[in-house]
Image (cartoon, helix red, strand yellow):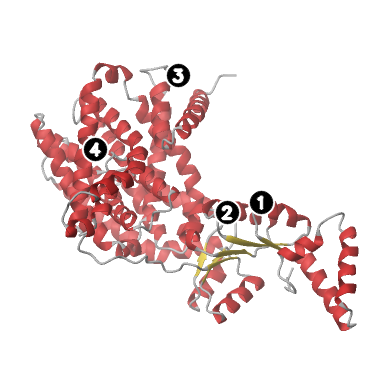
Amino acid sequence: MDEIPLLHDIVVIFGLSIGVLLLMYRFHMPAIVGFLCTGVLCGPHALGLIRDEGDVQVLANIGIILLLFSVGMEFSFKKIAEYWSYFLIGGSLQVGLTVLGGMLVGFITGADLGEALFLGFLLSLSSTAIVLRLLSEKMENDTPYGRVIIGMMIFQDIIAIPMMLAVPLLGGVAKTFTMETFWVFIKGLGILGLVLLSADKIVPFLLWRIARTRSRELFLLAVFTICSSVAWLTSNMGLSLSLGAFLAGLIISESDYRNEALGDILPFQDIFTSFFFVSIGMLLNLNFFLEHPFTILAMTLGVIFLKAFCAGVSCLFLKMPLRTVILTALAMSQIGEFAFVIAKEGEAIRLGSEYHYQLFLVVALLSMAITPALMAAAPYLADQVLRLPLPAWLKSGLNPPEKKQHAFKEHTLIVGYGVSGQMLARSSKASNIPYVILEMNADTVRKEKKKGELIYFGDASHDSVLHHANIKEAKVVAILINDSEAVFRILETARKLNPKIHIIARTRYLADMERLLEKGADQVVADDLGASVEVFTRVLHAYEVGSEALEKVINDMKADFHGFDLKAALSKAPRHETSVS
């Protein structure tokens, strides 16, 4: 039987990636750097382990489609409104200044206008994947500098789309404005109109009908179909696959099913995006680095300084404190993953020489690799700079202290809106306790939203769904669903995202109580145990049985439950709580 070449390449890439990523993890390096290094090792310029680079490229293209699809789903007009000054003013300034700086460098090195602008595009984009992951790990997304970074990076992710569309024009593929170019713009406007119509009317209704089936496979298939069909449509109309994938994500972003779709897509995105970064690494020539080490190091330091300077100036224009300026500047000083996408577009039309392309790859890789160290050192560096005799207005900025803005915090996260969930929500409302509801029944979500409940559709075992419910600032999670295995998955995810949160889990069976407590639940309520305790307690109270006799009954029941510590379980569970099977 003939060997499947693609299967060989997948085994090589994933097998080598595991070893490289373990090494990266040991030195606290981002996974993207590990995939780039994997590509370098298995590429034709090193070990030459990949037999057919074309097959890897196909998988890489799927990765780009899913990456842009996810970016589109995370983009929302609400988020732009929340960060509008950071997005519109800070983002446009940061990108504009960096593009101008890149163009200046290009002109100095003898590049023409198209090549200089192309260089500016490449340098203006920072790594959303690396920086936001580092911010999340340190729980600094909602700090002043975290909000500035998020606002600027939203702008970068959006502006990357027109940059990709402009690359063929820079390369001379379409230097003049022809009728064909005019029709491309008309088609683009038509597709945008279709996107707005779909986002408002068609897709929410379609996903609601599918979500009602509660079939995860059907929902995932529908999401993939929307993504691939819009990408295929834009490609056939003369636009790029990347633009179609972004627009498809934008369609879903405005629906109630965004978080569930994002949670379903992310594992596939991670897998296929890894092929993209591996394919980029395969293009890197190790001999090039050995032949030009000083040039590469000098260019890397120059890029970091240029990007940090432009981001810092943008923050100063926003009147941010000097500490925020320094933290933001160093966090955004690397070249981002979208720059690789744009570089691929430019390399395909021979925009720039092979020397410049190799130089870009090495510098981008090094700038990404050094980012965790720069962000770790940034607070210390900021403290040292603040000790200098600088003007007070520069140190403190001109803005009043910002307050954290969250729709909900210190809240209870109610997972499941059955009878128990409804009772908890009603009692929380009566006690003025803030709460957020996660529910998988699309009809329930639709009906309760009309009543004004803060309820979202989504599987709480997905990180993205819990992040959307702001689990990091929640006080309690109450898991009130009937699916025993799902309870365990949600428990593990919630504990991972917020180790300090108080978790109350409901289970149908007494046998699951001990496992749930071992997995990290603070309190567990079992339906059969709760019901039996409630029944015999009320019966004994009806007969006016004293507390000592009641204690004896509990001890006798301990033996009947095969050694299960019923008294300890009762101390974990609220007394006299009624559970409904």
Amino acid type indicated by mark 1: Lys
Query: Which sits earlier in the primary sequence, circle 1 or circle 3?
Result: 3
The image shows residue 407, relative to residue 236, as above or below, that is: below
Amino acid type indicated by mark 4: Ile
Amino acid type indicated by mark 3: Leu
Query: Which sits earlier in the primary sequence, circle 1 or circle 4?
Result: 4
Q: Which mark is residue 448?
A: none
Query: Which sits earlier in the primary sequence, circle 2 or circle 4?
Result: 4
Query: Which sits earlier in the primary sequence, circle 3 or circle 4?
Result: 3
Q: Residues within 10 Å of mark 3 (few under 14, many from 20)?
A: some
Q: Which mark is residue 495?
A: 2
Q: Which mark is residue 304?
A: 4
Residue 382 point in image, percent of width and height: 28, 48
The image shows residue 17, relative to residue 514, as above or below, that is: above
Asked if the residues shown at circle 3 and circle 2 are in contact, with their CB atoms under 8 angstroms apart, the answer is no
The reply to whether residue 186 is in sight is no
